[in-house]
Image: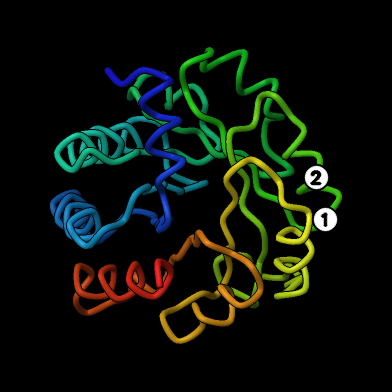
Amino acid sequence: MKTRIDRVARLARARLYCCTGARTSLADFEDFVNAIYEGGVDIVQFRDKTMEAGPALAHLELLRRAADRHAALACVNDRADLAVIAGMDVVHVGQDDLTPAQARSIVGADMLIGRSTHAIAEAAAAADDDDVDYFAVGPVWPTPTKPGRAAPGLQLVREVSSREFLKPWFAIGGIDVARVQQVRDAGARRIVVVRALTEAQSPTASALGLRSAIVG
């Protein structure tokens, strides 16, 4: 089992983060997460708001195994209870999910907690919250994974960058390899992607391209 020190160190080095739901089958899911880890993804988050606990745990078991194989981090969205059962490294909570303090009371001191932020005040609050280890900033561009949510855009990335927060933070929302330079120019050095990998014909090659683009 990874220690908190190890997890924090891996988070500090992380540049490329992928959020994914279930695939066509468990075998396809396992192949996919192994492929993107192979391509340089540092963190994979499993996110499925509708899946019941049993099937979700089956996915998390495969994710845990793949993360260990590649010395990477494994995350689950929102479900702090499943994070503990599956031995995740990270639980990620949104503004309408458990608060970071509530999540911390469930997962304990060693697990990392991420927080979604959509405005500079939310980012500043996450940066000041002792229970938050990193935060995500966006959406940078509108995305079908968050229908109806306004995209604060690159301006929010610029505002967060200008504050020089000490915690790691990731730009998220509609980012693909063609847009990475815009995100870098706005000040982000870490990104979360979804469709750029989940819909890629070659997930490993696409991950390699994204990593090269964000690392520069």
Asked whether, in this view, residue 67 is left or right of residue 126, the answer is: left
**Which residue is situated farthest in the bottom direction here?**
178
Label at residue 120: 1
Q: Position of residue 73 (x, y in %)?
A: 34, 39
The Cα atoms of the two marked residues, 2 and 1, are separated by: 6 Å
Figure disc tally: 2
Q: Position of residue 213 (x, y in %)?
A: 39, 75
Q: Are marks 2 and 1 in contact (CB under 8 Å)?
A: yes
Q: Position of residue 126 (x, y in %)?
A: 73, 39
**Residue at the disc numbered 2:** 124
Which kind of residue does numbered mark 1 sit on? Ile
**Which residue is situated farthest in the right direction here?**
121
- Quarter of the picture containing the N terminus is top left
- Quarter of the picture containing the C terminus is bottom left
Q: Residue at x 44, y 40 (%)?
A: 11
Secondary element at image label 2? helix
Q: Residue at x 22, y 79 (%)?
A: 201
Assess disc 2: are there few (<14), some (14-19) or many (≥20) residues with their C-alpha within 10 Å of its C-alpha: some
User: Which corner quadrant of the image does residue 67 belong to?
Assistant: top left
Asked whether, in this view, residue 37 is left or right of residue 123, the answer is: left
Q: Residue at x 35, y 38 (%)?
A: 74
Nearest the viewer among 60 and 169 is: 169
Secondary element at image label 1? helix
Image vertical order of residue 71 relative to residue 207, above or below: above
Which kind of residue does numbered mark 2 sit on? Ala
